[in-house]
Image: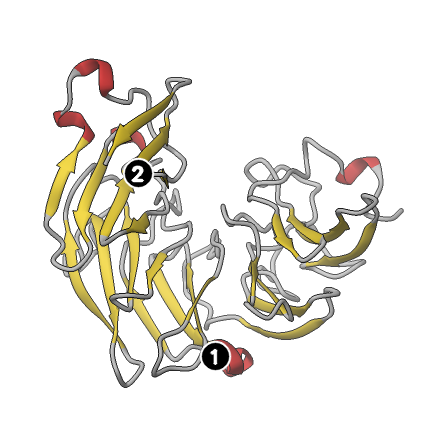
Amino acid sequence: MTRDDAANASPKTIVFGSPTLSGSDIYIATASPCDVRPYHGQIVRVSTTNGAILQRWYTTGATGPDGGGIWGPGGVSISPNGRWVYTATGHAFPNAQNAPYAEHVVRLTADLTLDAANAPPLSTTIDVDFGATPLLFQTAACHPMLAAMQKTGRLYIYDSNTLADGTIYSFQIGRSTPAGNFIGLPAFDPVLNRIYLGNPVDSSSGIVRHGLVALSVQSDCSVAIAWNLPVGVNSAGQNPSISPIVANGVVYYADGIGSEVFAVDAQSGAQLWVTNNLPDADRVTGGIFTSPTVVNGQLFVAGADHKIHAYGL
């Protein structure tokens, strides 16, 4: 049986992240609804011209074990020149959870041929998925870099040119929890050379608090915490990290089950406003589980209350 059969079809194999357009092709990544087997994480390259499937790449190989889901909300990442496809993968079954390319950060060619991969050293934590879309970023003084969030609460940073050699920095931002809620996609501000990400729960050491975290990329290409704003719900439960966005010097951060959106000064980390200070009719209820969007001077927020809320900026 091939992996195009009914055992691999929806609802067991589903698309979690956004399709990624590159040239005339779309890349689609698959996972499952909460590890319901059988499923096979894969990336599919599809032509927008005629809808044909051009190539597939399977996390665990064409005849490998179940698992290897690609859960990142942004789908895959494409290098600016369109040459490289980057992804980060979840665990495989039953025992060798990071084999062959499960729990890895991976670089593929545009036609989905494997070029490089790396798995950070295994920890004692079970299920150390990268529930993330790799963030590609670069400053004027530095080489192309990549950041990926792992369920252990660590953020891993790579030189994307030397991916197979391993990480160049890593930070214990959040806490390893059974829910594995340190997932998602950071935002990068090329003006300030900063990375912004959400942290659902205080770290075990208490050094990094829940809320919004800003990392500064230094002139020597090292990365350090610039500020940490403890806002929203501090929860080790089902409160995933919602990807923030940055626009015109302001970071917008949605706090999942807290149903709040915070506007934060990107430079100082000072809170500018929060939606829960608005009249009741303008508040979101039921949770916010997608990133806010800024378009033409307005902030759009999709809530679990089945409404799209628009705020003037």
Crowding around mark 2 (Cα neighbors within 10 Å: few <14, some 14 to 19, many 20+) is few
Is disc 1 placed on a helix, strand or loop? loop
Q: Nearer the viewer, residue 216 or 34?
A: 216
Which x, y percent locates residue 218? Answer: 25, 78
Q: Secondary structure at mark 2?
A: loop
| Residue at x 52% of width, y 70% of height | 119
* In the rendered image, the vertical position of residue 311 relative to residue 244, given as above or below: above
Q: What residue is pinned by disc 1? A: 166
Residue type at mark 1 is Gly
Q: Percent from the top left, x then y, of residue 138?
A: 40, 73
Q: Which residue is mark 2?
A: 297
- Tell me if residue 208 comes above or below residue 289 in the rendering: below
- Give me the residue at 49% from left, 46% from top: 73
117 vs 189, nearest the viewer: 189
The earlier-in-sequence mark between 1 and 2 is: 1
Residue at image x 86%, y 48%?
2
Question: As shown in the figure, which amino acid type bears the numbered disc 2?
Answer: Gly
* Quadrant into which the C terminus falls: top left
Gap in Å between the C-alphas at discs 1 and 2? 40 Å
Q: Position of residue 220 (x, y in %)?
A: 28, 86
